[in-house]
Amino acid sequence: MSTATQTTPDRPAAPAVAVRAPALVTGGSRGIGAATARALAAAGHPVAVAYRSGADEARAVVASIEELGGRAVAIQADVTDPDADVRLLDGAAEGLGDRVLVLVNNAGVRVDGLTAQLDDAGWDTTIDTNLSAAFRLTRRALGPMLRARHGRVVNVSSIAGLRANAGQPAYAAAKAGLMAFTSTAAVEVARRGVTVNAVAPGFIATDMTADLPTDELARSIPARRLGTPEEIAAAIAFLVSDAAAYITGTTLVVDGGLSA
Ligand code: NDP
């Protein structure tokens, strides 16, 4: 008979979920990031919920995690600021009591415009937020992961980086770049027990797609519906889990069959 779940006055019951390495989720205040923060917390990770402007939303995510017995902190930074990597990773380590060994680069923006019309600011913001910030955060996060011989980086890309979509040159370039960065970083650190993967969502029902004609979009998707943030979060949580220890350098497409 297993004694693992027996409770005695001097030996409390083991927690249902083992406590795991601290995680940082950028763009954790809304949409896919908020769902990911909750999914990682449910898997036992203390979570730093990073936000730019959504302080109330980030605090609500933290509260929902704490209500379920998890541990979370909210940390503010604009990921395009040059010192955001330091603020977020050092802040998360301080708030959670240990270094971050799980990084989810999820913060993103969509600035659309045909190539002949998109201005420099739209291009630069899109590349900086979706791609360069992920590089800077990953660069700083890798040191502790390599020393710990354990780490997980998951970059939130998009099927826009896999197939052409008129009007999204910057977004497509950023998300394709993120996939190439993912596989390159992965082979650099694989021998030290650190995995680097990407997820490529299709159309997901969040604020980012709120301006799109969802009924029309749904008809173009083999699954005949948009995905939910929780469905992307589940893929991210899988890539973070021990079950995915031998998966690295890959992009997991989660799109209801759209790109199949
Ligand atoms: P939302 O618009 O719902 O949320 C975007 C998140 O990113 C917010 O938490 C926002 O923070 C944060 N963010 C944006 N810019 C910055 C910045 N400069 N610094 C810090 N945080 C920032 O988007 P989704 O949840 O839909 O998107 C999440 C990720 O998924 C993005 O990378 C997106 O490109 C990708 N994706 C989404 C798809 C979709 O259909 N929704 C499809 C494919 C990929 P705050 O609110 O605090 O300002």
Image (cartoon, helix red, strand yellow):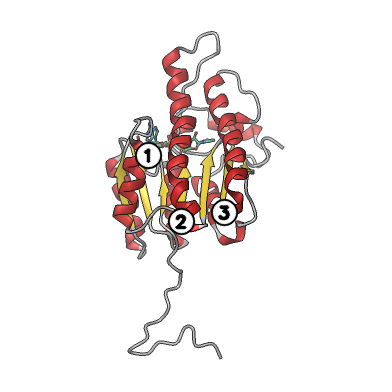
In primary-sequence order, the first of circles 2 and 3 is: 2
Give the residue at mark 2: 40
What secondary structure is found at the residue carrying circle 2?
A: helix
Instruction: State the residue in front, 135 or 1.
Output: 135
Q: Of the residues shown, which amino acid type is indicated by label 3?
A: Arg
In primary-sequence order, the first of circles 1 and 2 is: 2
Q: Of the residues shown, which amino acid type is indicated by label 1?
A: Asp
Lateral position of residue 193 relative to residue 24, left or right: right
On the image, the x and y values in percent for residue 224 come to 63, 39
- Of the four image quadrants, the one with ligand 1 is top left
On the image, the x and y values in percent for residue 220 come to 65, 32
Instruction: State the residue in front, 202 or 107.
Output: 107
Residue 143 against residue 206 in the figure, above or below: below
Lateral position of residue 183 relative to residue 29, left or right: right
What secondary structure is found at the residue carrying circle 1?
A: helix
Residue at image position (42%, 42%) is 140
Q: Of the residues shown, which amino acid type is indicated by label 2?
A: Leu
Q: Nearer the viewer, mark 1 or mark 2?
A: 1
**Going by the picture, which residue comes out furthest to the right?**
260
On the image, the x and y values in percent for residue 200 come to 59, 39
Residue at image position (51%, 53%) is 151
Instruction: State the residue in front, 189 or 199.
Output: 189
Residues at marks 1 and 2 touching, judged by CB atoms closer than 8 Å = no
Give the residue at mark 3: 192
